[in-house]
Amino acid sequence: MAEKAIRELTFDEPLLIERSVPGRVGYSLPQYDEKCSFGEAIPASYQRERPPVLPELSELDVMRHFVRLSRRNYHIDGGMYPLGSCTMKYNPKINEAMARLDGFGGLHPNLPVSYLQGALALIHELQNLLAEISGMHAVTLHPNAGAHGEWLGVRMIRKRLIERDGSPRKLILVPDSAHGTNPATCTLNNYKVVSLKTGPDGVLEPSEVERLMGPDVAGIMVTNPNTLGLYERNITTIAEIVHARGGYVYGDGANFNAVMGKVKLGKVGVDIMHFNLHKTFTTPHGGGGPGAGPVGVVSELEPLLPVPRVVKRDDRYELDFDRPRSVGRIRINFGNFGMHVRAYTYIREMGAAGLRAVTEMAVLNANYILSQLRDTYHAPHPELCMHECVLNDKKQAAHGVKTMDIAKRLIDYGFHPPTVYFPLLVRNALMIEPTETESKESLDEFISAMKAIAGEAESDPQLLTAAPRLTYTGRVDEARAVRQPILTWRSRGQEPS
Ligand SMILES: *Cc1c(COP(=O)(O)O)cnc(C)c1O
């Protein structure tokens, strides 16, 4: 047993290509027919002179290779993933079954509209459900991600201001607690960012907005609840100030898991918002699949939504391209449709009461963690939180232990680390979001691990500074991994060029 466990963790088995044995096959194809050669169709300059060197393996070898690789990755189906602001919740498998139904999974988006009626009905209903949940007037499902939704939202603000005043204005207010995609969105839309300081109790103050909201300011981007896990309780007053001066309020809905079914952002002054289906609505996140960032707007902005709009005329669903004020197309087809099927399944499965219960459990779980850890780790805002809580390494720093060491040591305890060093507002932050899908037992295991690590920080800090010990790689050079990624296979010993 023990040896097997170690084998799992050493990872120095031969790579796929090194297992190759000439002549071994894992497929069966029809006999190659000279007459069917593509020789004439492919220009000579593109033709290979020699067959490619590919690994020759049995199907079982290939299966084991990929399953082994998949086990090297941490994933929500394998363990708790308390990555703050990312809402890494369980993705129910019924979603997958629905997305794979032939009538959805086998559909081609270029089919005539008469063959797409079921899919268009689902899109239309999901748009309406999201509008209902958020209190927005209309929703588009086109954007591929939260960031794409933000980009579309600010694009619409820009277009609307040009329509209304002949000029888009120059600036946008972005709180200092914002996710990095907010300022990036402004820059991509040709706006300059004015950083808005968060008040001492972790929320925005109307007086700051009052001071900065000049005639050159197109609007404000607000994440509510914010990335400190606190509800922006002055949102209505702030929206009134922005509106009175001709600006628009963008609501970043990434943290919607904390207010769904409780607060309709459309009713507290938000003009445009995005949803992250891969956060709140249980579609796969990150490497698990493509994202989806639907955008909701108030009625004033509805004519600007991207084309085509899915509309219902009599009993038929149609694609409306005849929208002269639209910002245009922002991607091919209708968005990541498979994600729409999954999110729709989830919403219908939960119902209104279920979604409200999700919010309550998500907030309760985060508060449970905060209440259990705020004496062990420093909590800059130790009062009640929403869906996530923020701690830091202030108490452990005396032993030479930093946030990164705590995060890496958690891996040895079998947990994915929380979000670290974000929000920037909190020095060396550890941002924990358990989500509603974790049971009390898993929360307790996580809390025990965090407490054990705090104990080790005092008694044996080396355990933390050298962590992780039990993984294939230790600490990688994260900056280099991003800037100079090695994306192709190289034989052993061959140095990356
Ligand atoms: C995740 C997130 C985003 C960006 O969403 P993506 O879908 O990752 O592009 C924006 N704002 C906040 C607060 C987020 O947590």
Image (tube, grey):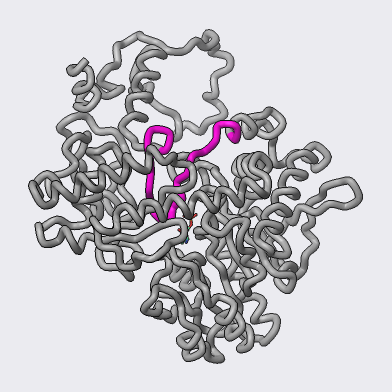
* Residue positioned 70% across, 71% down in the render: 301
- Is residue 83 highlighted in magenta? yes
Q: Position of residue 429 (x, y in %)?
A: 29, 61
Q: Position of residue 203 (x, y in %)?
A: 44, 74
Specify the quadrant of the image occupied by residue 487.
top left
* Residue positioned 70% across, 49% down in the render: 126
Looking at the image, which is closer to me, 38 or 334? 334
Q: Which residues are magenta?
A: 76-95
Q: Position of residue 482 (x, y in %)?
A: 30, 52
**Residue lying furthest right:** 314
Looking at the image, which is closer to me, 109 or 353? 353
Q: From the viewer's perspective, is residue 112 above or below residue 164?
A: above
Q: Position of residue 347 (x, y in %)?
A: 65, 45
Q: Is residue 156 left or right of residue 417?
A: right
**Residue 12 shows up from this direction:** yes
Q: Is residue 494 left or right of residue 244?
A: left
Q: Where does the C terminus fall, quadrant-wise?
A: top left
Q: Is residue 41 left or right of residue 353?
A: left
